[in-house]
Image (cartoon, rainbow, N blue to C red):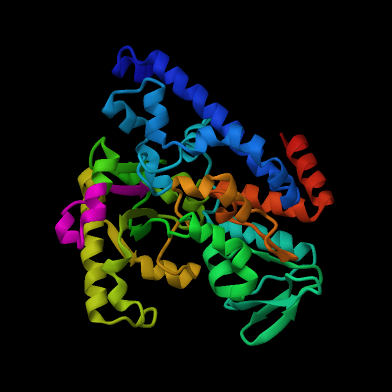
Amino acid sequence: MKRLEEKFPGCGPALRRYRRASQIAKLSGASLFVLKLFPLWVLQTLRPLVSLTWGWSTDRTAVEVMKSCGLKDEELVGVLTYLYGDYGLPPGRVSFLVQALLETHYEGGAFFPRGGSSSIAKTVVSAINRRGGHVMVRAPVEKINVEPLPGGGWKAVGVTCKGVDITARLGVVSNAGATNTFKYLLPEKAAAANLEPLERLGVMEPSVQLCYLFVGLDKTDEELNLPACNYWILGGHDHDAQFDKFDAAETYDDLGFLPATFLSFGSSKDDNFSKSTPGKATLQLLAPVKYEWFEAWREKKHQHRGSDYEAEKKVWAERLLAKLYKYFPQCKGHVEFHDVGTPLTTDFYLNTKRGETYGLTHKMPRFSVEAQEALHTETGVRNLTMTGQDHFSVGVVAALASGYITAGYLSKTALANGAAEAIFAS
């Protein structure tokens, strides 16, 4: 705050109003999220009250709220929203709630899992196995099996996986996202109660698509003097204008620039990396792209999409490496390995449909009370519950919290145990 006030004289009162608005929005968001611990009828009953407290932070864009707080300087607004790539929309299109959650998310600093992101999966799998559960890989679910209820409606009874029917003892929990769950895994009639309002509100639109570059270096972070942090490299302070140009471009050549590039030094943030992989370093870059730029290769098999696809990937590797060398020229000549991931790669590994890295788009309709009812833990199919980033919001922490909410919805014992662990751990 102090540095911003020095850079933008006279902005102090407006900044403080903005910070207060962000804190209030965060509390408002938490209240609706907590309501997903309870049966859907609770939220439906409280809808008039929730709409009053919730609507002011969801029915306006981030830019609208910032201007109402007195933040008129375009450059200052651009600085405050430079992390917009974390939710995949420019601040003039995103619900203020999402910006507020991100604004308060980094208070006190950030964290990185020792051993890299894969350690999260390893820890979760270990916890499941210790409790008698099982984790299967390369075993995609083909459909959620349902049965009609005597009085009308549907009940989830299990899933089909590689042609094998697996019967659920208590129910099915879907972390496959709203698009997969309601459009592809459930029968149309069973999904209608959730899918109809989501489509009518325009919520089923996919989020941003990204092109990734994974880089391996032949020297350590210390030798190359690489920082332990992330960067968003942006084309200017007016993020909405940049994204408008991106949307209007039919090809990259029409655009001629990247509106945003993310650069992360993964190994430098992991104090275990130098022990497991001595003498090396890694980093990652990513940038927003359009699915249509790669759609011509969609029907071809992963890793067998042909020489023209590989040539296109090489072009993107060169574009992203140029960004790296511009800001960290000491990396030039030390790139030992690099690999490009496109939206088609995202489809293959995450089973998305149009490379949607963040699941559903984070436009304002998604955070209306009606949409949140359709994205509630409890679905329109009995014994089918939802979890994951579409359950509330994008992000590792949001997905983690969603898992806790769903576990708490299904088992009040799990809820109490989780709360006790959090209290005593802190």
Region of the chain picked out in magenta, as a range: 244-264
Please identify the residue farthest to the right as the structure is shown: 413
Give percent across and percent down for residue 228. 42, 41
Q: Is 256 inside the magenta-drawn segment?
A: yes
259 falls in the magenta region: yes
Q: Residue at x 21, y 65 (%)?
A: 315
Nearest the camera: 27 or 275?
Answer: 27
Using the image as rendered, state which of residue 166 and residue 62 is in the foreground. 62
How many callouts does the rendering have?
0
Camera-nearest residue between 227 and 341: 341
Please determine whether, in this image, residue 330 is positioned above or below residue 182: above
In the image, residue 12 sits, relative to residue 231, either above or below, namely above
- 370 on left or right of 221: right
Q: Quadrant of residue 345?
A: bottom left
Coordinates of residue 192 in the picture (x, y in percent): 60, 67
Residue 344 visible, this orientation: yes
Q: Tell me the quarter of the image containing the C terminus.
A: top right
Q: What residue lies at 75% left-to-right and 71% top-to-bottom? A: 152
Q: Position of residue 290 (x, y in %)?
A: 30, 61
Residue 357 image offset from top left, x and y in percent: 44, 59
Identify the residue at image location x=37%, y=39%: 91
Residue 177 appears in the figure:
no
Residue 165 in the image: above or below residue 283: below
Taking the image as shown, residue 254 lies to the left or right of residue 265, namely left
- Residue visible at 34% across and 48% down? 262
Q: Quadrant of the N terminus?
A: top left
